[in-house]
Image (cartoon, rainbow, N blue to C red):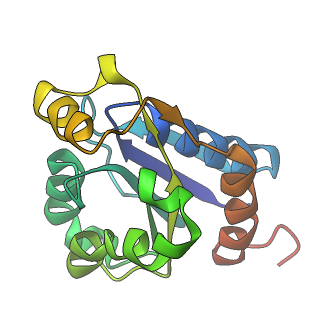
Amino acid sequence: MGSVLVTYATRTQAARDVAAALADCFSRAGHRVRLSDLATEDPAVTGVDLVVVGSGIRATTWYPEALAWLSARASSLAQCPVAVFNTCLNAAEPDKRDEALGYNRAATATVTAVAEESFPGRYVREQVGWVSRLFLRVLRKPEQDHVDLSQARAWATTLAAFLPDQHA
């Protein structure tokens, strides 16, 4: 079995919830998993077979701590498969899927990703800064939660192809 590092940056906990669902799927499949919040940790990339990095989105881009970690670890990340994901409200709208996937550009400009995804996120007024609250108020966006962990679990199944097989 393989070793997986799942990292994330979040404000509304949507990316954490998706990362935890991914980590749980890998763990249940028998893989060793480390789950790490990039706001409080700087995980090493050594000894892993797959790295999954996720971030919430603010103003169409990843959170700075996630991009900084990718940049600082770029040479190590070039040695193993990397998958990236974001969580954002636009991913909840089918006609905005390409736009939501495009928010991964800053991450994939830093590392080559073997897979990328965008998951529907959430907006919880108390968990975002006043600028974001003001912006979303101008857009007349109510609080909402579109996080669907079954989508994360399905993606984990596809990512398992990048891990060593137990029968190999």
- Camera-nearest residue between 65 and 124: 124
Which residue occupies 69% across, 60% down? 156
Determine the image quadrant of residue 82: bottom left
Which residue occupies 62% across, 44% down? 23
Kindly tell me whether residue 26 is visible in this rendering: yes
Instruction: Tell me the quarter of the image containing the N terminus.
Output: bottom right
The outermost residue toward the right is: 167
Where residue 37 appears, as percent x and y from the top left, is 36, 35
In the displayed structure image, the side of residue 57 where residue 4 appears, left or right: right
Where residue 27 appears, as percent x and y from the top left, is 72, 44
Kindly tell me whether residue 88 is visible in this rendering: no
Which residue occupies 48% across, 45% down? 121
Determine the image quadrant of residue 80: bottom left
In the displayed structure image, the side of residue 52 where residue 4 appears, left or right: right
Q: Is residue 49 above or below residue 66?
A: below
In the displayed structure image, the side of residue 44 where residue 31 appears, left or right: right
Which residue occupies 59% across, 56% down? 3
Q: Is residue 107 above or below residue 19?
A: below
Instruction: Tell me the quarter of the image containing the C terminus.
Output: bottom right
The outermost residue toward the top is: 126
Determine the image quadrant of residue 111: bottom left
Where residue 102 appears, as percent x and y from the top left, is 34, 76
- Camera-nearest residue between 150 and 8: 150
Q: Is residue 162 above or below residue 24?
A: below
- Camera-nearest residue between 11 and 34: 11
Where residue 117 appears, as percent x and y from the top left, is 51, 68
How many marks can you see? 0
In the displayed structure image, the side of residue 37 where residue 22 appears, left or right: right
